[in-house]
Structures are given as structure tokens and as C-alpha cells.
Image (tube, rainbow, N blue to C red):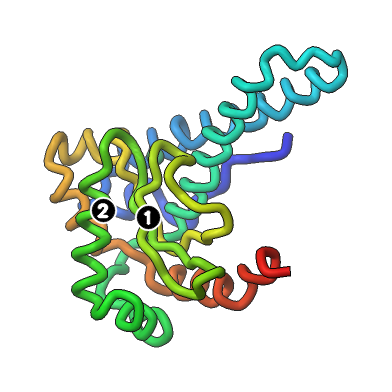
Amino acid sequence: MSYSLPELSYDYSALEPHISARIMELHHSKHHKAYVDGANNALAQMAEARESGNFANINRLEKDLAFHLGGHVNHSIFWTNLAPDAGGTPEGEVAAALDEFFGSFGAFKAHFQAASLGIQGSGWGVLAWDPIGARLIIQQLFDQQGNTAQGTVPILQLDMWEHAFYLDYQNVKADYVTAFWNIVNWDNVAKRFAAARANAGASLLV
Ligand SMILES: [Fe+2]
């Protein structure tokens, strides 16, 4: 198996009252697990297709891999972007970069919230490093894999699928997004930002 479900560094109840233990348990042990299994299954079926020389299902398998691997990557990042007793405002390089590329932390938050709440259907709000432009951008990621450019590196992601909030917030998505800011792990964002800025361009600009 190529992919496995990562352990969380906190308990399912640790993000309460912002995200309930019930959502966290279902989200991690069922939803994320299904993406891991789906990605492994797609790889296994691709190997079978190569062995048999029968590629009749290759279009479906490529879509399955993109969707399920996307789900695995997105959730793996999302869990580390969150922490109990977190939130507040970023400091240091992240704070300076948000000012540089979005004008201010407040303007970044407003843009990120609007993009997240505006997603039509299921998807993610994403703060990403674009190594070609050497800048931070905000993306609307559709489903688990759509509407982004190759090579951008996610720094901070917010799951806007209904499974991420509906048990706690029903249709009031804005309250979920507001609560998210109380559990953003800015230390993790800073580590991801530093790593992306140092390394992400190397593989694109050769
Ligand atoms: Fe999710």
C-alpha cells in the first residue's frame, strides 16, 4: 500500500467547541480513510491494467486517483493546519508575507473567507505558494483536485465540504469559517511557508 491514514497529533475532542469530536472522528476515521483506500485501490487497478494490457478503464482510474489522492493530501495538510489553543494572528515571515501579497492580515482574512464561502459545490479554500510568481495566492479548490495550477504548494487549507461542518453548523457556513480562525495552527503555516519558499521552485524552474 502506497498511502496510509496519518495519526492526528491531538484527540478528536481537542478542537471543541469549534469542531466537535463527532465530526472529527467521522472526518478522520471514515472520510479521510476512504480517500486513502480509494487512492490505493486506483493504483492497484492501474497495475492490473498494465499487467493485462487492458486499459479500457484507464480514464475512470485516472480520475479516481486524482480525486482520492487529492482527498488524502488535502486532509493530511488540513489536520496539521489545526491545533487546540491556537488561532490568533500570525507573526514573523507569514505576517510580513500576508501584508506584502494581500495588503494586510485583515484583507487576507476577508479574501480567504469570501473565497471559501463562495465555493459552488464541494471544495476547499486554499492559501498557496506560487513558485513561478514567487508569491502567495488564494485558490478555490473544487472537489479534491480541481481549479488549481500545477506546482502551487498549499500552505493553509480549509475544508468546505459539508461533511466538515454540517453536524455542528448545518447551513450556516459563515459561523464555521469564523470558528476556523480560532484553531489555525500558525506555527504549522509558518513551517509550510518556509519550506515551500525555499524548495518549491526548484523542481519547476529547471
Ligand atoms: Fe473533508
* Residue 27 in the image: above or below residue 183: above
Residue at the location (26% across, 37% down)? 120
* Image region (quadrant) for ligand 1: top left
Residue at the location (60% across, 20% down)? 60
**The quadrant where residue 53 appears:** top right
Kind of residue at badge 2 = Ala
Q: Percent x, y for residue 45?
A: 72, 21
Among the two numbered marks 2 and 1 on one chain, the one whose residue lies closer to the N terminus: 2
Q: Nearer the viewer, residue 196 or 87?
A: 196
* Residue 50 in the image: above or below residue 189: above
Q: Percent x, y for residue 199?
A: 64, 72
The residue identified by callout 2 is 115
Q: Percent x, y for residue 206?
A: 74, 69
Mark 1 nearby-residue class (10 Å; few <14, some 14–19, many ≥20): many
Residue at the location (30% across, 62% down)? 183
Q: Rounded to the nearest whole Å, what is the CA distance between mark 2 and mark 1?
A: 7 Å
The residue identified by callout 1 is 139
Is 88 left or right of 147, judged from the image as shown? left
Q: Secondary structure at mark 2?
A: helix
Q: Secondary structure at mark 1?
A: strand
Asked whether disc 2 touches disc 1, contact meaning CB atoms under 8 Å apart, the reply is yes
Is 127 left or right of 171, judged from the image as shown? right
